[in-house]
Amino acid sequence: MKILMISDVYFPRVNGVSTSIRTFAQSLRQQGHVVHLIAPKYPVAIEQSQTEDEQWITRIDARKIVFDPEDYLMKWSALMDYAGHLHTGDYDLVHIHTPFIAHYAGLKIAKQLQVPAVETYHTFFEDYMHHYLPWVPRSLAVRIAQSVSRKQCQQVDTVVSPSAQMRDVLQQYGVTTPITVIPTGLDASRFIPGDGAAFREKYGIPAQRPLLLFVGRVAHEKNIQFLLEMLSLVIQDHPEVLLVITGEGPAEAMLKKMSRDKGLQQHVMFLGYLDRAIGLNAAYQAADIFVFASKSETQGLVLLEAMAQATPVVAIAELGTASILRQEQGALIAKDDELHFAEQVQTLLIDRQLRERIGKQGKRYVEQVWSSDAQATKLIECYQRLVLSHLSLAASATA
């Protein structure tokens, strides 16, 4: 098949959407399909920008977003200039990955090419819009998010949801467009053992120091402040424990201030983004426990990445993470309560054999259930059904 993807974000912007696009695209291309991505051009040197890795990507001129310095918005005029060079037959469908410029451009391109449009609902906007629109009452921000999500999902031919839980939420919004549940899988590189000892040495972390790890965007919706509250409780019995936070985002300054205010400076380390090819696997390997408290995930890829490195997880099972987490199959599930979460962490810190057993079970679980090739095959089947339906409707209209 010939697939045109379009997204408002992609690497070097690190987040779950970028990871999902790359993972699916790699598997689809390995299976012999043609994949092309339209994404923003960032004002930094793009790694391997002139190599084969970027040959399948068209970068569109973009401008800075005032309230979110990490992201850049593709310029509509530049996007339409590029779209003007596309012709019927170039692609079998358009796959939209984000709800901003990419959504409306994707719809326009799909109409121009006379092909169906599919959209993945990657982000649970209801749960975090109020953080970025603080002047808008939270109840109104939630209604706006629901309304926009419902309208946009109704504008495409099929919606892909990363989890059954997110599908149920969209249906509660009133979305009647067909929704197919297809999570993002893990590619083989996520299972390559990282060098945890080298990671600890690089950042000056003693080999025996208890290490908790968070990986993800340092944003309000990730609920990292909950982890700091939890950490304060764990320290009472494990005074040497360290929480490493990797990633960047708009909540970083607030979290650093919170760490200072709570006297946690010696127990929290902010590292920024890590290289995914080597650094991230090493971080997972170095950690005794991966901790995650987000309640707004449509899936939660980092949980799978931690398990792939045999690192046990303590996390809240809510929305998309509930589709991944299985008690003692790589994780201990915690309640949305700092004390209960801290107790689960302490259970693993105390019992090394339990940590190792749960970690090994998690790796086996991810290997068996969450491979990227299996999920890509599901996506192709979804595409094929969509294209056949579209052709059938077009034939009926001309009959």
Image (spheres, rainbow, N blue to C red):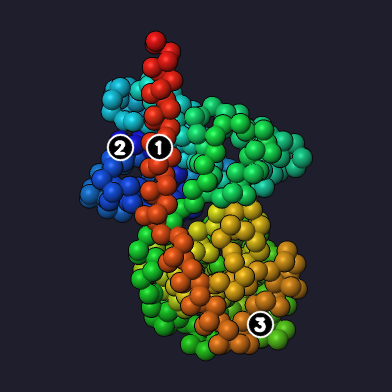
Kindly identify which numbered label has been placed on residue 347. Answer: 3
Q: CA distance from mark 2 to mark 1?
A: 9 Å
Residue 287 % position (x, y): 51, 77
Indicate the secondary structure of the residue bearing disc 2.
Answer: loop
Mark 2 highlights which residue? Answer: 1
**Which residue is pictured at 38% across the width and 23% down the height?**
391
Marked residue nearer the N-terminal end (3 or 2): 2
Amino acid type indicated by mark 2: Met
Residues at discs 3 and 1 in contact (Cβ within 8 Å): no
Give the crowd class for mark 1: few <14, some 14-19, many >=20 residues within 10 Å. Answer: many
In the rendered image, which quarter contains the C terminus? top left
Kindly identify which numbered label has been placed on residue 64. Answer: none
The residue lying furthest to the left in this view is 51
Residues at discs 2 and 1 in contact (Cβ within 8 Å): yes
**Which residue is pictured at 54% across the width and 27% down the height?**
155
Marked residue nearer the N-terminal end (2 or 1): 2
- Asked which quadrant contains residue 382, the reply is top left
Task: Tell me if I can see residue 228 in this picture.
Answer: yes
Amino acid type indicated by mark 1: Tyr
Mark 1 highlights which residue? Answer: 383
In the rendered image, which quarter contains the N terminus? top left
